[in-house]
Image (cartoon, coloured by chain):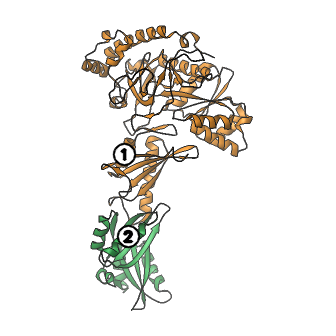
Chain colours: A orange, B green
Amino acid sequence: MIFDMDIETLPREELEALQLKRLQSLCERVYANVPFYRRAFDEAGIKPIDVKSLADLRYLPFTEKQDLRNHYPFGLFAVPRDNVVRVHASSGTTGRATVVGYTQRDIDNWGRMVARCFAAAGTTRRDIIHVAYGYGLFTGGLGAHYGAERLGAITVPVSGGGTRRQAMLLKDFGATVLCCTPSYSLVLYETALEAGIDFKELPLRVGVFGAEPWTDEMRRDIENKMGIKAIDIYGLSEVMGPGVGIECLEAQDGAHLMEDHFLCEVIDPVTKEPVAPGEMGELVITTLTKEAQPVIRYRTRDITRLVKTPCKCGRTFARMQRVHGRSDDMLIIRGVNVFPSQIESILLETEGLTPHYQLVVRRDGNLDTLTVQVEVDEKIFSDEIKNLQRLEGKIQKNIKEFLGVTTQVKLVEPRAIQRSEGKAKRILDLRNECK
Amino acid sequence: MKAEQISIFLENRAGRLEEVTRVLAEAGISIRALSLADTSDFGILRLIVSDHEKAKVALKENGFTVGRNAVVAVEVSDQPGGLHAILSLLCSGGVNVEYMYAFVHQCERSAVIIFRFDRTDQAIELLQKNNITIIPGEKLYSI
């Protein structure tokens, strides 16, 4: 089913005309109301009036995650604060989170886009949608929630955690749709099995999974085990939250991006020039309709490519292939974004150390685990076990508090961490090796 | 009356202890006493050696994290109740033992116990007041 038939199937020429009109209006808005963008436009030597076609997009300045941090918390609002009705924030150490604001219309648009997503995943108002994304500052829970309500389905706001109880509720309520990270769906499935609940015997028929990268093998595994259709949903809080794109049930081949609201391009992350159509590169998103906090050419750091050929579902929106990787060092651990620099500042704050550390990511069963290896130097070394164990516990607790992710902390000998050309390798990703 | 102990951080993996003994052997250092405390991930090796300065330098050069701590070596008569008498004394004096390890004195028919106290100075004062023999560092290193 297509939720917004007129828009989602708009011929591409008409879609592009709409995008241009919205882009021009956006440029006027941010130039007039956001000092950061006025400066950036001036530095790039471009005025809103110079934007005459979509091809002019390449002359507009980029927005980076760091720009959002630099204007923490409300420095990039494009509307008076009175018009903002909600904020979300991504993880960060104190004072460094990226905050995003929404007007009522932004919230309405978001809900509508997520409703489109649920429809594309083959669900309707007759469904019961179990939302196991975390509710709170993270956009996952509330994002899915408003979309499910907009669709008109029965929405079950379970949020994250309490897996055993979730399994019970899933069975008792007879949910037909499950929303969470793909890895959590497997944890939930296994916990349910242990409690004698087999997903295959439940009414559950669709999973809308996102917030972390996953593969087609994992999709097949999930679909076979649970007897459901597993649909990939894409989004990021900096431009909105979940619902920026969704796979259609018909093709399950790349997420259709909501192009009436987002202008998407793919660039070479090194030269920053647009790649040839269909080539792989970094996805860059401009929010066309966002009121409270629009972004111009936001660098998502997600590596993918766009396919604009017609899709068998009838939608004309471009499809992005599964994210191949990142053009920065961000890790996604069970849906939580983690940058090595965040761990580093936590270590510095923990004991005032300048330790050498390494993040080791493994896949343990279905869950990603993060081990923080810290080299023991003379400043932190003690001849008593309890002091070292206390230190491990403290680091673990601080990371959990600041980033919301559970890690294992392991003390290692100096130089145990590989250094290439004198520079420590901060991330060791073993997820593909220990499948 | 304190003695110097060196402590070494070791990851719990094959060959690490052997690496320590290799470094010490090559530097011509004798081990007088040792104790190893361990968890599932790491261990702490504590050593009394013939030359702690030299040992520390050699180990650091080989990439180990080395600490130095003040411990107290106490001579305990080799008879029932010998250790108990000392611990009772310390206990009543409010001194806690963080850890301890022992070895037998070859020629004097007594045991030597290496103590790591939470309050070392207070412990020494208490032991001396009660005429308990403390082996000075210099003597200990050459036992």
- Residue at 40 percent of width and 45 percent of height: A343
Label 2 – label 1 distance at C-alpha? 31 Å
Asked if both marks, 2 and 1, belong to the same chain, the answer given is: no
Secondary structure beneath label 2: helix
Q: Is residue B110 above or below residue A233?
A: below
- Number of residues whose C-alpha sits closer than 10 Å to that of mark 2, classed few (under 14), some (14–19) or many (20 or more): some
- Letter of the chain that mark 2 sits on in the rendering: B
Residue A171 placement, left or right of B98: right
Disc 2 versus disc 1: nearer the observer: 2
The percent position of residue A33, horizontal first and vertical second, equals 33, 16
Q: Nearer the viewer, residue A395 or A21?
A: A21
Tell me if I can see residue B5 in this picture: no
- Letter of the chain that mark 1 sits on in the rendering: A
Residue that badge 2 annotates = B20
The percent position of residue A406, horizontal first and vertical second, equals 50, 46
Secondary structure beneath label 1: helix
- What amino acid is labelled 1 in the image? Glu
- What amino acid is labelled 2 in the image? Val
- Number of residues whose C-alpha sits closer than 10 Å to that of mark 1, classed few (under 14), some (14–19) or many (20 or more): some
Q: Nearer the viewer, residue A273 or A98?
A: A273
Quadrant in the picture for the C terminus of chain B: bottom left
Could you say which disc has been placed on residue A219 in the image?
none
Q: Is residue A90 above or below residue A108?
A: below
Could you say which disc has been placed on residue A344 in the image?
1
Q: Is residue A67 above or below residue A430?
A: above
Q: Are marks 2 and 1 in contact (CB under 8 Å)?
A: no
Please identify the quarter of the rendering in which residue A6 is found.
Answer: top right
The percent position of residue A123, horizontal first and vertical second, equals 65, 22
Q: Nearer the viewer, residue A395 or A366?
A: A366
- Residue at 44 percent of width and 80 percent of height: B102
Please identify the quarter of the rendering in which residue A252 is found.
Answer: top right
